[in-house]
């Protein structure tokens, strides 16, 4: 009892701090959830109008769950709804998970209509405005953006984004996929030694799964290409 009396004040301070921390954490999560729910409500009309406009124009890409659906509308006939949706997303000062999901969905839609530059601008804006850079969702955003830069031929920019993904603990399940894409980027810009190192790293990783076979395939093609280039003409 004497020990408790002697440290009573310290115990009260510690317990109070723990209670306050727990309450603050709960309050912040509650606030964040409510903000995200509001974002979903705000986004819904823009998404619905785009789906309806595309459907009226004879397209079925936006609301289709199949990657093989190729029934497009004339893009000009839905450009107003696309621009409204995109402008609303790019007007946000604070990006919530709902905004990230919507941006990735709209970006994929734009790519299928061959509007890659618009897709890149949208995703890059959301990336810059995102406040939760350690989240799993942010990692997916970076991978989608990096892949778009790969497709565009900007391999240096893609490497930067993939490197950021590899620094995030939340992205561990994507590491092998991202490493493989990074190796392809290095090979594409002529940094062949670095590409070879990454292919080897993937092949030697017992947890790489199907990416081990893909790395082996790419590495074989890579070495064959090197041999052909060394042959005298």
Image (cartoon, rainbow, N blue to C red):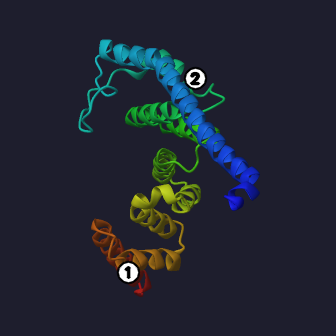
Badge 2 is on which residue? Answer: 87
Q: Judge whether 189 appears above or below 223 on screen.
A: above
Single out the residue that lies furthest toward the front: 1
Question: Is 162 or 170 nearer to us in this picture?
Answer: 170
Quarter holding the C terminus is bottom left
Question: Is 177 or 152 nearer to us in this picture?
Answer: 177
Residue 226: which quarter of the image? bottom left
Question: Is 117 or 94 nearer to us in this picture?
Answer: 94
**Residue at image x 51%, y 54%?**
153
Circle 2 crowding by C-alpha within 10 Å: few under 14, some 14–19, many from 20: few
Q: Judge whether 211 appears above or below 82 on screen.
A: below
Badge 1 is on which residue? Answer: 223
**Residue at image x 41%, y 22%?**
75
Query: Quick check: can you spot residue 76?
Result: no
Query: Quick check: can you spot residue 30?
Result: yes
Circle 1 crowding by C-alpha within 10 Å: few under 14, some 14–19, many from 20: few
In three-dimensional space, the C-alpha distance between marks 2 and 1, rounded to whole angstroms, equals 46 Å
Q: Judge whether 174 appears above or below 58 on screen.
A: below
Left or right: 15, with 161 as reference point? right
Of pointers 2 and 1, the one earlier in the residue sequence: 2
Residue 122: which quarter of the image? top right
Numbered disc 1: secondary structure:
helix
**Position in image of residue 20 (x %, y %):** 66, 40
């Amino acid at each position: 009892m004497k020990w408790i009396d002697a440290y009573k004040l310290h115990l009260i301070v510690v317990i109070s701090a723990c209670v306050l921390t727990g309450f603050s954490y709960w309050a912040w999560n509650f606030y964040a959830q409510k903000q995200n729910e509001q974002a979903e409500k705000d986004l819904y009309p823009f998404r619905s109008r785009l789906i309806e406009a595309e459907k009226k124009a004879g397209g079925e890409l936006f609301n289709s769950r199949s990657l093989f659906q190729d029934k497009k509308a004339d893009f000009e006939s839905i450009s107003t709804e696309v621009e409204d949706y995109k402008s609303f997303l790019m007007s946000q000062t604070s990006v919530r998970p709902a905004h990230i999901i919507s941006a990735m969905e709209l970006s994929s839609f734009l790519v299928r209509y061959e509007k890659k530059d618009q897709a890149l601008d949208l995703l890059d804006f959301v990336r810059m405005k995102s406040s939760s850079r350690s989240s799993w969702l942010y990692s997916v955003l970076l991978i989608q953006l990096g892949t778009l830069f790969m497709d565009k031929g900007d391999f240096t920019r893609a490497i930067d984004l993939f490197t950021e993904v590899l620094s995030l603990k939340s992205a561990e399940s994507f590491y092998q996929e991202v490493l493989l894409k990074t190796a392809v980027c290095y090979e594409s810009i002529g940094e062949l030694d670095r590409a070879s190192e990454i292919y080897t790293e993937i092949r030697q990783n017992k947890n790489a799964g199907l990416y081990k076979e893909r790395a082996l395939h790419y590495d074989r093609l890579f070495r064959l290409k090197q041999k052909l280039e060394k042959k005298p003409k």
